[in-house]
Amino acid sequence: MNIDPDAYTVLCFGDSNTNGIPSDDEDYVRLAADVRWTGRLQALLGDGFHVIEEGLNGRTTDVDYADRPGCNGRPYFAPCLRTHHPVDVVVIMLGTNDLKTQFDRSPEDIAAALDGYIDDVDDNAANRDGGTPRTILVSPIPLDDTQPMFAANTLGAFDAAAVDKSRRLSEELLKVARARGVHFADAATVARAGGDGLHLRLDGHQPLAELVATTIQDALADLVAAHH
């Protein structure tokens, strides 16, 4: 925990790719804090920031599994925001699990769900000055069904249509970001899936951290200037 009272709070809300699940470990042992992108983000931003990890394996935007309670991110999101008050930046990277065949969702459906998250930030969160936190929508990396462990590790959860939808998700999320006036980053521009075709390659964590760090600094530029 960063105990500097002046540190900017950054809440990273996502799924297993925010939690730090590796792509090439059959046991899926969580990566160490200094390896996963959120930990690297903390290192890049420095002591003036406090990065909070809120990544859950299997988390969806707003749909429920029949046999996996607690993975619908939407009911938890508002209390999560209030728990960590004040929050200066909210980084949201979700959507991959919504592509599972059982949910039958389109990229447009997922984008609409994430639009609702922006409403939740507006209604349930405030920064140090009482204003609305800066929100960053991060489009997740696409699925890669050419990877050697994809079929075995996803156990049929994703089909060819899901893979195609994953490639179209960034375009829809960018539309939402522009319409709502929030910031956007596309993880696929700097990282890709590893051996299981689902989770970040190890060498993608650093560039993703750098992309998010730059986006955070841009998002906070005017607020930081006002405090100096």
Image (tube, grey):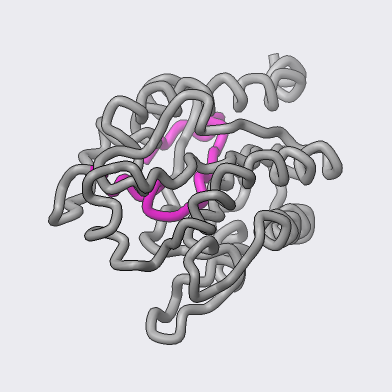
| 144 relative position to 123: left or right | left
Whether residue 50 is visible to the viewer of this picture, yes or no, is yes
Name the residue nearer the viewer: 151 or 130.
151
Q: Residue at x 76, y 20 (%)?
A: 222
Horizontal and vertical percent position of residue 165: 58, 52
Q: Residue at x 52, y 34 (%)?
A: 5
| 134 relative position to 7: left or right | right
Q: Which residue is drawn at 65% across and 38% down?
A: 136
Horizontal and vertical percent position of residue 56: 40, 59
Q: What is the residue that sits farthest to the right in this orientation?
A: 179
| 32 relative position to 142: left or right | left
Q: Residue at x 27, y 31 (%)?
A: 202
Segment tinted magenta in the rendering:
1-23
Horizontal and vertical percent position of residue 207: 42, 22
| 138 relative position to 24: left or right | right
Does 150 sit above or below residue 208?
A: below
Q: In which quarter of the image is residue 218?
A: top right
Residue 42: say if magenta: no
